[in-house]
Image (cartoon, rainbow, N blue to C red):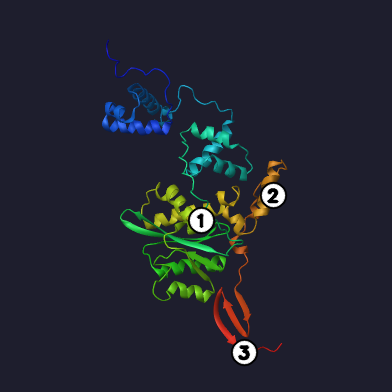
């Protein structure tokens, strides 16, 4: 009785592999050969050769990586969605590669376009989207905190990356309540003076926070004595809150922005130089603050909605658009202009018998003694 040929199609039930798994197996076969890949993965040789054929056909039709051919090309999904809707979904996805179906659904809903998450997922999968692997469940639920109002707390953190051989440092200052980035700086050196400059620029533009939350890095904290950063905060009357050692989740909100900007911009774009990186990061931050919906604040709001106190009006407009009142969900008049924003320049405070004089959010003098009224 002759042995079964190596390349014969397997009989019986077969496991169905996702396109991402097929691509991974094919990369292995390209590197070590089909025979060794069969022995290592347990996938039949017939499957390998069929996937290679489908990949080649997709590449010949304009797909450079052949990923579209690794799906069920012989049975393409039937999507009963207008072509205009598909273009809108794909436009949001191509401009925000880190978005999943639910985020795209919220982004479209914000501008008055209704398309359910299931349909969006089908559109994306037909164009090469693969569902990311789920994270393992937490052993215990983390305690979550959110400031109750803008500028009650600002989180600050540093992200390091390279542009060619040059190391750069991106400092972000994020409002805990709204997730609005009130300050940022791209630095060519990591010093406490540069960090102070980023903070003071944020105070000049948006006002003084009540507290600042940081880790114990050298640009924020001095282990012996009181550092310059702490003295500046004390001068402004800002509380400095330090996260617990080896506990990065305390700064989870600003850490999440770090991951997003690294995944969506820094890891995807090859910056020409420092100035190019600064320009493109500035555009990303402006879009993040004013255009990008945020899952942590309800899904359809952008950070600027909460920071400028217009969240209720925006939600009312979005719900009104869904009910068909003909209104635009987010009209231009709801966009708060920088020049129309209220900023406190000068204050007199009285604490017991001491009068404090504040200018631009900083205490500049104090007078002791009683006052006759």
**Residue where numbered disc 1 is placed:** 253
Q: Which residue is mark 2?
A: 316
Q: Residue furthest front?
A: 139
Q: Is residue 355 above or below residue 58?
A: below
Q: Between marks 1 and 3, how big is the CA–CA gap?
A: 44 Å
Query: Does the CB distance between marks 2 and 3 fall below 8 Å?
Result: no
Label 2: few (<14), some (14–19) or many (≥20) C-alpha neighbours in 10 Å: few
Marked residue nearer the N-terminal end (1 or 3): 1
Nearest to the observer: residue 124 or residue 298 = 298
Q: Quadrant of the C terminus?
A: bottom right
Image vertical order of residue 70 relative to residue 92, above or below: above
Residue 283 is at least partly visible in this image: no
Asked which quadrant contains residue 64, the reply is top left
Viewer-nearest residue: 149 or 96: 149
Q: Is residue 3 left or right of residue 247?
A: left
Residue indicated by mark 3: 369
């Amino acid at each position: 009785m002759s042995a079964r040929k190596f390349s014969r199609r397997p009989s019986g039930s077969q496991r169905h592999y996702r396109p991402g798994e097929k691509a991974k197996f094919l990369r292995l076969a390209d590197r070590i050969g089909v025979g060794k890949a069969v022995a290592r993965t347990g996938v039949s040789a017939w499957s390998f050769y069929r996937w290679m054929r489908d990949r080649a056909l997709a590449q010949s039709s304009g797909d450079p990586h052949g990923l579209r051919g690794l799906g069920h090309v012989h049975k393409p999904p039937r999507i009963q969605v207008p072509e205009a809707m598909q273009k809108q979904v794909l436009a949001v996805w191509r401009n925000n590669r880190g978005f999943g179906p639910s985020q795209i659904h919220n982004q479209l809903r914000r501008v008055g376009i209704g398309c359910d998450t299931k349909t969006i997922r089908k559109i994306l999968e037909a164009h090469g989207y693969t569902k990311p692997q789920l994270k393992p469940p937490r052993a215990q639920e983390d305690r979550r905190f959110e400031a109750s109002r803008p500028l009650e707390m600002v989180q600050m953190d540093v992200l390091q990356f390279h542009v060619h051989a040059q190391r750069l440092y991106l400092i972000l200052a994020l409002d805990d309540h709204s997730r609005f980035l009130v300050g940022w700086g791209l630095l060519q050196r990591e010093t406490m003076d540069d960090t102070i400059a980023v903070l003071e620029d944020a105070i000049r533009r948006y006002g003084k926070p009540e507290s600042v939350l940081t880790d114990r890095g050298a640009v924020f904290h001095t282990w012996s004595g009181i550092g310059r950063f702490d003295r500046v905060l004390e001068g402004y009357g800002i509380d400095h809150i330090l996260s617990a050692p080896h506990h990065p989740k305390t700064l989870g909100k600003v850490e999440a922005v770090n991951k997003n900007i690294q995944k969506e911009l820094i890891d995807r774009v090859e910056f020409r130089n420092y100035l190019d990186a600064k320009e493109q990061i500035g555009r990303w931050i402006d879009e993040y603050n004013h255009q990008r919906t945020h899952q942590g604040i309800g899904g359809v709001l952008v950070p600027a909605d909460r920071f400028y106190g217009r969240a209720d009006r925006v939600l009312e407009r979005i719900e009104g658009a869904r009910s068909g009142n003909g209104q635009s969900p987010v009209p231009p008049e709801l966009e708060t202009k920088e020049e129309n924003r209220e900023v406190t320049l000068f204050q007199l405070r009285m604490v017991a018998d001491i009068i404090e004089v504040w200018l631009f959010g900083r205490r500049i003098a104090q007078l002791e003694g009683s006052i006759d009224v």
